[in-house]
Amino acid sequence: MTQSPQKPNVVFFMVDQLSARWLEAAEAGACPVPNLERLKRRGVTFRHCYSSNPVCQPARATLATGLTSRQHGVLQNGYRLDASLWNFMRALQQAGWRTGSHGKIHFLPHWEKIRPEYDGFGWDVIHHTEDLRAGDWLDWIEAEHPQHYDTALALTRAPWIPEFAAYGPEKRDLQKRIHEILETFEWAKPDFPADTDFAYTFPMPAELSQTEWITRHAERFIRETPAGTPLYAHVSYVQPHSPYCPPGEYMHAVDPSKLPPIAPPEWLEADPHAPAYFRRQKCEPGDWMLRRHYYFADIAHLDAQLGRVMDALDAAGRTDDTYLVFLSDHGEMLGDHGFHQKEERHYDACIRVPLIIAGPDVSGGTTREEIVQLEDLAPTVLDMAGLPQPRYENRMSTYLRQGFDEVPTLPGRSLLPLCLGEPVAGWREDAYVESYNAIWSVDPQDWARTLRTRDWRYTFYPCQGGEQLFNVTEDPQEQHNLVADPACATLRRELRDRLTERIVLQDYPLTSRQLFGIGLH
């Protein structure tokens, strides 16, 4: 039995810290991705999708609420997303969808609590595990595979969090136990002597990995949702976020000769006009070509999980009535320009993310060149589900000016017409990207602001932090900063003016946080 087309299923297959740049390299032969190719044959690939705040919590808050960072207030990791704000998961739940979250959510700081409270965000079912590798997954290892429990403890992150010292109902001191395990833990293995705590082959059977634990819960959710009940499944993996930890068998799937070369740190020596921000930086050490091997092995492992989720939809008879969205929250520098991770280094590997959408009547096997942003996903889901966009609540309608019912509440636009091959007028010509600094910095020079067009990337760092201007069409490795080139002076002013306007418009539509009424006298 299949779903009614009026209430289709929606599945987000979400990975953490995957650049579109690296997924394209995988497709070019760095590692096999047969299930990604299977999805692309059914779906639309958006080549120019940008994370508007390339770090976990702000990006995920934007995906859920459809709001910009300034509108929802999650400026960087460490903020809490307000559960009272509208989000599309709760909209689906209230309209009759069965909603399930499997894996990483990260609307709340995982450094604050090992078990964040996500009950108010619109999930019927939650199987939660995040970067810390504690909580539900760790407890499952202890209960079902106790012979591997010490190894799992060695894989936890940030054991200095106070909750590790009084873990679970028994208030056990896992801090001490983890410390003792790590004193003698051997990362290197006979087959993989290069393993380190930053990039290692998973030291347990693959089926015990956090990745496959997430997949099994997603499969079960799809299988157990009653026929005739539409579902929303949020299938969200921690990988390929560092530390990279693929099962060893996937290391053999990577072709080292096809791994993309590292983009040199042009700001270090070759760029006399490098922004002051960069002059405070240091290249991050490590064998990045070797680390890329582990990262791409993680991609191959994730591709296998995509196949399992797609097979589960097939087995449940839901494929024809399911929109499946493959996406990432932000990118990963992976050694390019001397850096790893993400945040305020707004190079292509950091800000451009993969986005593939398949589903009913979608123009399969096509590629779109429009510039899209994560803000577009919430209105897209509403469009898929046939639900209206949220509206401002007129609590004092007697005092409101007329016509406010037509004021938009979400800054993004639905991508569904593009997926269906319909003509769309007035699409945006640029993407806006911002960073408010990493959690270990309080320096406003790290507050990067970027305008990205099809051909150019212009970035401004405040407080004399400097500027970058790259022709990304002619210089895809972003090696030649043209900000001081007299031939680009007019273009630089134009892009800076456009960036200024986009900065101002980050507050439009007006935020719904703590809103009493729009337009009160």
Image (spheres, rainbow, N blue to C red):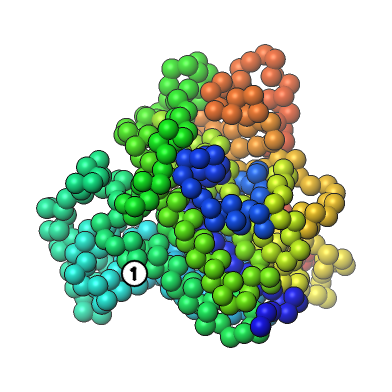
**At label 1, which amino acid type do we have?**
Trp
Between residue 337 and residue 148, name the one nearer to us.
Answer: 148
Q: Is residue 158 left or right of residue 105?
A: left
In the rendered image, the residue lying farthest to the top is 486
- The part of the image, by quadrant, that contains residue 501 is top right
Q: Position of residue 366 (x, y in %)?
A: 72, 49
Q: Quadrant of the C terminus?
A: bottom right
Residue to which mark 1 is pinned:
137
Residue 188, percent across and down?
A: 20, 46
Query: Looking at the image, which residue is at 57% across and 22% down?
Result: 481
**Where residue 216 appears, x then y in whole percent?**
43, 71
Vertical placement of residue 356 versus 400, above or below: above
Task: Please determine whether, in this image, residue 96 is positioned above or below residue 75.
Answer: below
Q: Is residue 273 above or below residue 519?
A: above
Q: Nearer the viewer, residue 430 or 437?
A: 430
* Location of residue 340 in the rendering, given as x and y in whole percent from the top left corner: 41, 39
